[in-house]
Image: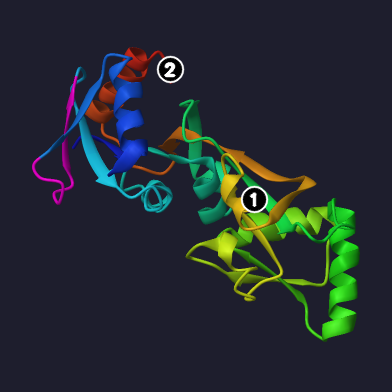
Amino acid sequence: MSIKLGVPSKGRLMEKTFDWFGARGVSLSRTGSDREYAGAVDGVDGVELVLLSAGEIPRELAAGRIHLGVTGTDLIREKLGQWEQQVQELAELGFGQADLIIAVPGCWVDVETLDDLDAAAADFRARHGFRMRIATKYHRLVREYLMDAGVADYQLVDSQGATEGTVKNLTAEAIADITSTGDTLRANHLKILSDAMVLQSQATLFRSRVAEMSDEDRAAMAALMATLQLGD
């Protein structure tokens, strides 16, 4: 066996992850063509690189099919219930930062806070006969956040495409989505509620709490943690 390290398979997240490990003496590289999800690890023995989509990594960690994985905090907490029992956060990597926020149309001049949203949702239901729709990919995180804030009279609708466009397209009245600069929100005439920071996310190295390890695997893990200068 070997320690399996799951890394995003393409784009800036993959490149930045390779850079982060490389700066700490562990060289990660993609082998073969862009269509092949194969890679190599140099600088420490007994570690195998597994290239996956960032969205697959939480599932693979929770299933114990990989020992380590780099993915966003948002994906871990959205996809894994009681996530701390399934994975351990080892290190924030300092890139891939994004905020999960709640935004409403800019023309809603009286809606600036979650309390305002709660009042607007009650008024919306009274006038229209159905609950205000909030489009999001992050159902677990947003539902828990709004419940804690006491916001009622809303419904979450699934958005797997361009969430920012759902208000313009009249398929939702508000959104909850990841943003880094806010430019796309402003381009779609949306504003972020002043107290609606659901989660600040970034690329993070996680360790599976359930993946099986042999004595050789434990030795390889310890060597990798020492090379990366992370506490084991």
Range shown magenta? 32-42
Instruction: Answer yes or no: is residue 68 visible.
Output: no
- Using the rendered view, name the quadrant where residue 230 is placed: top left
| Location of mark 2 (residue) | 230
Task: Tell me what residue is drawn at x 90 percent, y 58 percent.
Answer: 110
Task: Please state the horizontal and vertical placement of residue 49, each as a whole percent of the image.
Answer: 22, 36
Residue 44 within the segment the image draws in magenta: no
- Quarter of image, res 10: top left
The foreground one among 45 and 98 is 98
Label 2 Cα neighbours within 10 Å, binned few <14 / some 14-19 / many ≥20:
few
Q: Where is residue 34 in the image (x, y as percent from the top left)?
A: 15, 46
**Location of mark 1 (residue):** 186
- As shown in the figure, which amino acid type bears the numbered disc 1? Arg
> Is residue 118 found left or right of 212 in the rendered image?
right
Is 24 displayed left or right of 92 in the figure? left
Which of labels 2 and 1 is toward the front?
1
Magenta-colored stretch includes residue 33: yes
Question: Is residue 216 placed above or below 188 in the rendered structure?
Answer: above
At x 53% / y 41%, what residue is drawn? 73
**Left or right of residue 200, residue 23 in this image:** left
Residue 166 percent across, percent down from the top left: 59, 68
153 relative position to 75: left or right: right
Which residue appears at 80% of the width and 53% of the height? 148
Of callouts 2 and 1, the N-terminal one: 1
* Residue 89 locus on image (x, y percent): 51, 32
Q: Is mark 1 on a helix, strand or loop?
A: helix
At label 2, which amino acid type do we have?
Leu
Q: Assign the N terminus to one quadrant of the image.
A: top left
Q: Which of 209 and 42 is in front in this view?
A: 42
- Whether residue 58 is visible: yes
Whole-number angstrom distance, CA of label 2 to CA of label 1: 40 Å
